[in-house]
Amino acid sequence: MLIAMAGLPGAGKSTVAEAVADGVLALGQSAIVDAVNAVEAARGQWRALAARRGVPVVFLEVVCSDQAVHRGRLAGRKRGIAGFPEPDWAAVERLRAEFEPWPGEGPEGSRRPERLVLDSLDELELNVSTALGFLGAVS
């Protein structure tokens, strides 16, 4: 089953999504949260939910290591969703500036066991295979 949340900003989607994810985890199933998770407070809510349910939490962070490619993808993005303008590069840069470091990371960029960084320049099949291997090792 695919669960897609819908509703206006501020309507309570995130609250409902977290409660539904809690219920899904209680049923022994997995849940995927698709969010920026730029700040530790946002990541912490998922860690807390996983801890309440006694399940591991993992973060799959997707990056684009080529700024020109990233910018081009954004410029060419046309989802055609009425009332929701596409973010521009300035919005991405603002969010990047607000992106908080992951706890436990050293200057060399070491990873915590809960986090895997995938580069979207790599082939999708490679990223999926790498992610599934990581998830299998964590579970």
Image (cartoon, rainbow, N blue to C red):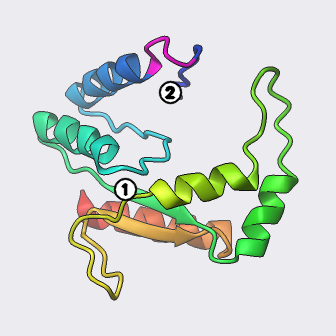
Q: Amino acid at mark 2?
A: Met
Q: Camera-side residue: 101 or 5? A: 101
Q: Quadrant of the C terminus?
A: bottom left
Q: Is residue 69 positioned above or below 23 on the image?
A: below
| Residue 136 placement (x, y as % from top left) | 32, 62
22 left or right of 120 in image: left
| Residue 55 placement (x, y as % from top left) | 18, 44
The residue lying at 50 percent from left, 41 percent from top is 34
Q: Which mark is residue 1?
A: 2
Q: Look at discs 1 and 2 and give the one toward the viewer.
A: 1
119 left or right of 38 in image: right
| Residue 82 placement (x, y as % from top left) | 82, 21
The residue lying at 88 percent from left, 53 percent from top is 76
| Residue 130 placement (x, y as % from top left) | 47, 71
**Region rendered in magenta:** 9-13
First in sequence, mark 1 or 2: give its number: 2
The residue lying at 30 percent from left, 75 percent from top is 111
Q: Quadrant of residue 110?
A: bottom left
